[in-house]
Amino acid sequence: MPGDYVPTTLAAYRRFVDHFVALVIQKATAWGIPDAAKTRLTDGHTEWTAVRDEADNPETRTSIVVEKARRLQKENTANIRWVVNTYINPNVTGAITAEDRLDLGLHAKDTTPTRHPAPTSRPNVEVEPSGKFQHKVTVLNPVTNKKEKPADAYGVRYAWQFDGITPASPEDLSKTKFKRSTQEKFNWDPSDQGKPVHYAVAYENAKGQQGPWSAIVSTVVP
């Protein structure tokens, strides 16, 4: 459906649901989401992930496994929509902020004023070591090469992946989060030193509509 918050491509869907479920688990108590709802969400996601991994593996993939993965993905999506419609959209406790919604990958409420469609600006990104086991990621305006956001941007979607080869596209980076600020620090464990990390960023408007990704910047944990 147009404007749907659930991604259609598998890589984007996997990234979205992994982040959504992890964030709901982390914030469930503060957001007034009961344990039973959290369990339903996590159990469905865990089951889908296990079967999806089987479907992705040539050694275990069969037509039956692929069909089961499709069915469980539909159930997983239904669980996510149920949590959103039952607990997040009503926002009974008032604890879920507009920034929380964007971090979940949801659109802001329709009453949120937005003068622009999805951003068209493609940011530049700079990644620097800022101490032992820490990176500072700075998002730069493509026109001024400074930290101020362009007029069509409300905040920034940060994406990253620890270890492994550089992905073919920012869409394939495994983790994301939304922040209003144009600079973010990422802390790593001492055991991660020397291992690769890949970063990319994109601007978003106040309704969570995303603009084009920056190039991927690959570096190592200092």
Image: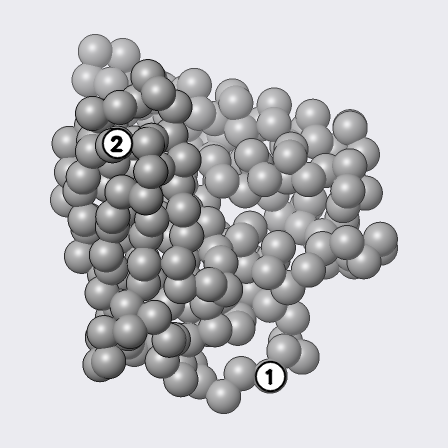
Q: Is residue 50 left or right of residue 75?
A: left
In the rendered structure, which amino acid carries the disc numbered 1? Pro
In the rendered structure, which amino acid carries the disc numbered 2? Val
Q: Reading the chain from its start, which is encountered first: label 1 or label 2?
A: 1
**Image location of residue 8, percent across then percent down:** 38, 51
Q: Closest to the observer: 1 or 11?
A: 11
**Residue 202: which quarter of the image?**
bottom left
* Circle 1 Cα neighbour tier, 10 Å, few/some/many (<14 / 14–19 / ≥20): few
Residue 10 visible in the shown view: no
**Secondary element at image label 2:** loop
| Residue 213 drawn above or below residue 57 | below
Q: Is residue 82 left or right of residue 63?
A: right
| Residue 34 drawn above or below residue 120 | above
| Residue designated by label 1 | 113
Q: Closest to the observer: 52 or 206?
A: 206
**Image location of residue 35, percent across then percent down:** 78, 28
The residue at the point 59 percent across, 40 percent down is: 23
**Secondary element at image label 1:** loop
Distance CA(mark 1)–CA(mark 2):
40 Å
The residue at the point 39 percent across, 58 percent down is: 183
| Residue designated by label 2 | 221
